[in-house]
Image: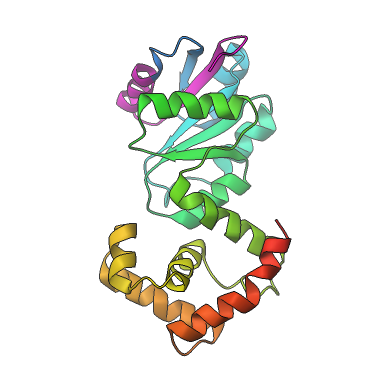
């Protein structure tokens, strides 16, 4: 991909090793320059502004513990800088919160150098890179939230939305567990929670509920 200038990037991670690793991944990208490193959001805002950074790569080791205001603070204090998240797959609700708080996109932590560079270019050009497996789930949950608290989708978490989508495809608990890399007991619990929340007695009824309500959020896209 050809660009007119080098994309100026600031990396954000608590660990010095991780920051060095991000630099190493990007060192062979001729159109990307890491201009600064930071340990937290406040430091990132300062160094990003001083260095004229255009994209902030924020490493989130544990999404369950991250302050979701991090993206919001960067976007408010230095709106010229877009935020790209690199995270572990463990808390989809938090990932959704980060996106709604201003993150332009996210990748999972096993990203390759090429994937990271391409995602930075995409963010810089105004796109929103996301892991393909999660993109449809996030989009669906955002549509559901847009309908407000009275939407039939509102009680479902993003994790439950993902499981329900797979139930509708006809996947068994074991298949879902394998694909999501989660324990069978976790999937069983989520299925029970889904059925209770939508008032369905079984998986067939859940699929019928999906068919009745899916067109509504789709129109809100």
Q: Give the farthest residue toward the front.
A: 170
Q: Let me know if residue 65 appears in the view.
A: yes
Left or right: 37 in relation to 214: left
Q: Residue 111 occupies which quadrant of the picture?
A: top left
Query: In the figure, 116 relative to 67: above or below?
Result: above
Q: How many marks?
A: 0
Q: Let me know if residue 43 appears in the view.
A: no
* Residue at 56% over, 32% down: 83
Q: Is residue 7 one of those drawn in magenta?
A: yes
* Residue at 53% over, 54% down: 136
Q: Where is residue 104 shown, x and y percent of the image?
A: 59, 37
Which residue is at the front of the view, 21 or 200? 200
Query: In the figure, 84 relative to 161: above or below?
Result: above
Query: In the figure, 45 relative to 63: above or below?
Result: above
| Span of residues in magenta | 1-25
Query: In the figure, 69 relative to 28: above or below?
Result: below
The colour scheme is rainbow
Q: Where is residue 99 shown, x and y percent of the image?
A: 58, 45
Q: Residue 79 occupies which quadrant of the picture?
A: top right
* Residue at 59% over, 59% down: 140
Q: Is residue 82 one of those drawn in magenta?
A: no
Q: Where is residue 139 shown, x and y percent of the image?
A: 59, 54
Q: Residue 121 occupies which quadrant of the picture?
A: top right
Which residue is at the front of the view, 113 or 36? 113
* Residue at 47% over, 77% down: 194
Q: Give the farthest residue toward the bottom.
A: 201
Quadrant of the rendering where the C terminus is positioned: bottom right
Q: Where is residue 43 shown, x and y percent of the image?
A: 52, 25
């Amino acid at each position: 991909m050809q660009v007119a200038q080098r994309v100026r990037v600031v990396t954000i991670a608590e660990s010095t090793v991780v920051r060095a690793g991000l630099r190493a991944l990007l060192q062979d990208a001729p159109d990307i320059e890491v201009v600064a490193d930071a340990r937290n959001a406040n430091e990132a805002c300062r160094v990003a502004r001083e260095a004229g950074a255009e994209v902030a790569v924020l490493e989130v080791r544990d999404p369950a513990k991250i302050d979701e205001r991090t993206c919001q603070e960067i976007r408010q204090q230095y709106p010229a800088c877009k935020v790209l998240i690199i995270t572990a797959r463990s808390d989809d609700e938090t990932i959704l919160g980060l996106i709604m708080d201003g993150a332009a996109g996210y990748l999972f932590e096993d990203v390759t150098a090429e994937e990271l560079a391409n995602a930075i270019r995409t963010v810089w050009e105004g796109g929103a890179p996301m892991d393909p497996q999660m993109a449809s789930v996030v989009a669906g949950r955002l549509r559901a939230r847009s309908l407000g608290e009275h939407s039939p989708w509102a009680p479902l978490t993003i994790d439950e939305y993902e499981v329900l989508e797979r139930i509708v495809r006809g996947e068994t608990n074991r298949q879902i567990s394998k694909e999501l890399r989660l324990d069978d007991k976790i999937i069983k619990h989520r299925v029970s929670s889904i059925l209770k929340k939508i008032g369905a007695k079984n998986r067939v009824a859940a699929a019928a509920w999906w068919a009745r309500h899916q067109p509504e959020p789709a129109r809100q896209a």
